[in-house]
Amino acid sequence: MNETKTAFKRMKDLPSTHLLGTGTPMCAGCGGLQAIHEIYDILGEKTVFVNAAGCMTLLSVYPFTPFRGSWLYTSMGSAPAGAQGVRDALDILIQKKRIDSRENLNVVVLTGDGAANGIGMSATSGAIERDLDFIYICYDNEGYGNTGQQYSSATPHAARTATSKGPRGFPGYKKDLFSIWASHKPTYVATVVGAEPVDLARKVEKSKKMKGPRMLIALSPCPTGWDFNPMEAVEIGKLAVRTGVWPLKEYADGKVVHTKIPGRRPPVEEYLKLQGRYAHLFRPDRNETLLREIQARVDAYWDGVE
Amino acid sequence: MKRKLLTGNAAAAWGARLARTDYVPAFPITPQTEIIETIANWVDNGEMDARMVTLDSEHSMITAAGAAATTGVRVFTATSSQGLLYGMEMLYTVAGWRAPFVLVNVSRGLATPITLEPDHNDILAARDSGFLQIHCATCQEVLDSILIAFRLGEDERVRLPVIVNLDGFYLSFTREPVEIPDAEAAGRFVSSYDAGNIPFRASAPVSQAVAAIGGTAYSYFRYETHLAAQNALSVYEEVAGEFTRRFGRTHDAVETYRSDEAEYVFVMIGSFATKAKEAVDRLREAGWSIGLVRPRLLRPFPEEQIRRVLTGKKGIAVIDQNLSMGKGGVLYMELASALHGQANVPPLVSFIGGLGGRDITPEEFYEMASVTRTAAETEEIPPPRLLYTKGEIREVRKLQAIAHAERLELEPEK
Ligand SMILES: Cc1ncc(C[n+]2csc(CCOP(=O)(O)OP(=O)(O)O)c2C)c(N)n1
Ligand code: SF4
Ligand SMILES: [Mg+2]
């Protein structure tokens, strides 16, 4: 990333006041909320969030909202279509001179991984194909969190969820949402994590200046669903990046660029063993086969990058 | 004002155009597609100043429709059968947004089996969604009802989306002479769109459709929607009255045909009511005292009018082009509940017919009339009757025999 163009070079450049109000019903240590906080500070209040069913739906519960800007809850599957309706209507109103262009808003979709990878995929794909001018924020807690963390198609291999409690955990593999988006040739796709706020801030800053379909996929360490001490949420987010489990990257102009290539990657185990959802890989016996497989997949990914 | 031969679909497109629709989210489905094709052509030729977007599904289409109406533009959309059901979650959802727009549903029977021709199970599945419902029997009514629907839904006492329903094939593809109102006059009638108090603007943030946890807040909003739908009864009278004054055509919430002095009455909705009118005329020639009552407004249900025109009759034949599996006809249930507990309630006899576009013949109307008269005279109400002839059973048996024989031929010798 071109450092000279960014207002965010180091931690102290980050906004010191926060736009999103406090007192929400999210769990302590929620990595999703952390990411949304950081993103919202840079997006600013001239936004309308179009939300799909998930944990974050409970941010706005009658009669309270932590948002300074606007909010529209749609359904689990159709937030991008809601964004289409709002965007088109604002464009029509401005074009027909019924409202002043200063009344314009950034239209931002906010959904979990379940909506983004599954039930909302058709609506998402359609919105990208129509070149909808919007930002999509997917907070990825790697499961259907709001309903009690059942596995979704973003759940990583071997993770225990409410619907994969067997000795090998989730048998499937995490869907590659980044590539699915990139294959549509949108304006911008990036992965972020709240624990790397400078990288996140630069990406939000960059995407905010663009037009067209833009996606921010935020890995969202989830104490409740991943079973870890809320105090460790930030550490787990950092470890996800350092161990190479969560590559920080962006897609623009047909190219994928890694924004933070971990130097010496600690073993993935370091990341896994802090989370109860992987406890069965360590106790009562170490599951060497699965641990090796998970490590090998991460290594193979970076072999393709480095 | 000009007079033209129009299909029901073209009349629907004209309704959207004359209402100065800004935005048309769309998705194709037979027999509705001609509506969106017509609008797409007008938009491309610059004859209609609207934006049309084809979404990925009806679920998305209805979401976009509600979102755009909430943001502050006039929205028209259309679908049919499977599409209406595919969008069902969003029908309920956007009605709660209190975002008025007009959706035309071209009725078509539902799978399974998959079919193309009409009955009313699709539209009745949306009965409890919060959308108001206007049911049309002619192409003229389709156009007029769309103009009325915009006014009705957008009225500040109502603020609800409205479905205007027409039957696939029988109306959608049938050409009838239609008077197309003058664009200026239609524009004055609908006036400009008002987003109400919930538009999305940078200077005035709003939260729309937030969660309401706990029965108290939830019930409050649900009751509000119900009361608004009920307000639509008197608002409909006003708006339809104004329509009559401006355009000279009358579209009552409940149409009555030769029923005022009649002893017996057919009740049905939609275009097949035209067949019932024919039957009424023939039966009258044969000395019957009979008429037709056709509710145009199904939500809100015009209970008072229904009571007024049906109590005191000798017998009512309710003809349902729908089937609630394990119960019977939906219109029959609606009428029974509206009349229950009233004085001088006539016997209601239930008939199911016209499913998947199956005709209802004049002979069947005569038969229904006499079954109803017998019920009234003997005070014994027969169970709901499924209209079906021996000939039809023979035809199906024949098809089964052919299929069976083909299979035997294909099977290898044992
Ligand atoms: C059509 C539909 N199906 C199912 C649900 C139930 N539901 C609500 S939230 C949710 C999980 C959403 O998962 P995700 O998108 O990952 O968000 P998270 O809950 O993890 O924040 C589900 C299944 C629903 N609201 N709507
Ligand atoms: S379940 Fe997880 S994602 Fe949902 S609010 Fe709690 S910590 Fe956040
Ligand atoms: Mg999730």
Image: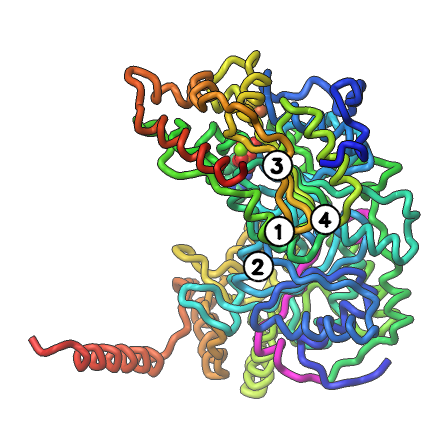
Q: Position of residue B354 (x, y in %)?
A: 48, 73
Q: CA distance from mark 4 to mark 1?
A: 12 Å
Amino acid beneath label 4: Ala
Kindly indicate the quadrant of the structure image that contains residue B218. Answer: top right
Q: CA distance from mark 3 to mark 2?
A: 45 Å
Neighbour class for label 4 at 10 Å: few (<14), some, many (≥20)? many
Q: CA distance from mark 1 to mark 2?
A: 8 Å
Q: Is the distance from the Cβ of mark 2 to the nearest ligand 1 atom less than 8 Å?
A: no
Label 1 and label 3 in one chain: no
Q: Position of residue B344 (x, y in %)?
A: 57, 58
* Chain containing mark 2: B
User: Which residue is under mark 4?
Assistant: B67
Mark nearer the viewer, 3 or 2: 3
User: Which residue is under mark 2?
Assistant: B84
| Rendered position, B365 above or below A57 | below
Left or right relative to A85: residue B352: left
Write the start and end of the magenta stretch as one range.
B154-176
Say which residue appears at 55% left-offset and 41% top-offset: A115
Query: Any magenta on residue A136?
Result: no
| Rendered position, B291 above or below A26 | below
Say which residue appears at 64% left-offset and 25% top-offset: A194
Q: Nearer the viewer, residue A290 or A275?
A: A290
* Chain containing mark 3: A
